[in-house]
Image: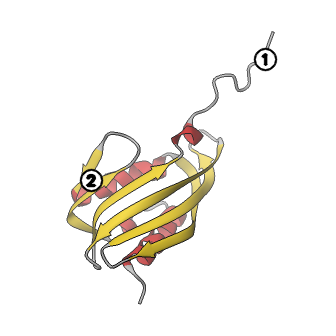
């Protein structure tokens, strides 16, 4: 049987392919918390849906590939690389790690750490030097 971490990885792929956060949200517990590189924290199932909806809205396409994961029955760790296109049309590729705390059935906490510089468009792009 797949660990919750493996279920999470599959649900993320499905969420990205369908552009629907439901497969991921279904893995979260009522009192869950979610954090990314911002200072904001999302909580509860409504927070999980908002978090993953906002994630998808950043991209016109996105696909995550996992190159390492581990799960000890309470904590899951995933290392990944995501590639796609931002909503504004620019290509993006970035790497990161995500951690879930769980009880084997539902995710209680999700934290993700990634190269946020990949989202910043260089100020001089497209400008001619004169």
Nearer the observer, 60 or 68:
68
Relative height, residue 88 to residue 43 (above, below): above
Q: Residue furthest bottom?
A: 1
Give the side of residue 69 with respect to residue 41, left or right.
Answer: right
Q: Quadrant of residue 127?
A: top right
Tell me the residue at 34%/70% (across/down).
75
Nearer the observer, 77 or 48:
77
Res 25 seen here: no
Residue behind mark 1 = 128
Helix, strand or loop at mark 2? helix
Relative height, residue 126 to residue 68 (above, below): above
Nearer the observer, 72 or 44:
72
| Residue 104: x %, y % from top left | 29, 79
| Residue 103: x %, y % from top left | 25, 76
- Locate the C terminus by quadrant: top right
| Residue 79: x %, y % from top left | 52, 63
Residue behind mark 2 = 47
Q: Residue furthest front?
A: 72
Relative height, residue 56 to residue 14 (above, below): above
- Locate the N terminus by quadrant: bottom left
Q: Residues within 10 Å of mark 1 (few under 14, many from 20)?
A: few
Tell me the residue at 28%/79% (across/down).
105
Of the numbered discs in the image, which one, if any, rests on residue 120?
Answer: none
């Amino acid at each position: 049987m797949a660990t919750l971490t493996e279920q999470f990885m599959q649900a993320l792929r499905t969420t990205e392919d369908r552009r629907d956060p439901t497969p991921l949200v279904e893995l979260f517990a009522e009192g869950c918390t979610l954090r990314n590189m911002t200072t904001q924290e999302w909580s509860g199932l409504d927070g999980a849906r908002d978090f993953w909806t906002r994630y998808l809205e950043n991209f016109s396409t996105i696909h995550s590939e996992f190159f390492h994961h581990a799960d000890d029955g309470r904590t899951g760790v995933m290392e990944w690389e995501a590639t796609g296109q931002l909503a504004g049309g620019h290509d993006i590729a970035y790497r990161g790690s995500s951690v879930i705390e769980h009880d084997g059935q539902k995710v209680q906490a999700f934290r993700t750490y990634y190269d946020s510089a990949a989202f910043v468009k260089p100020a001089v792009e497209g400008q001619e030097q004169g």
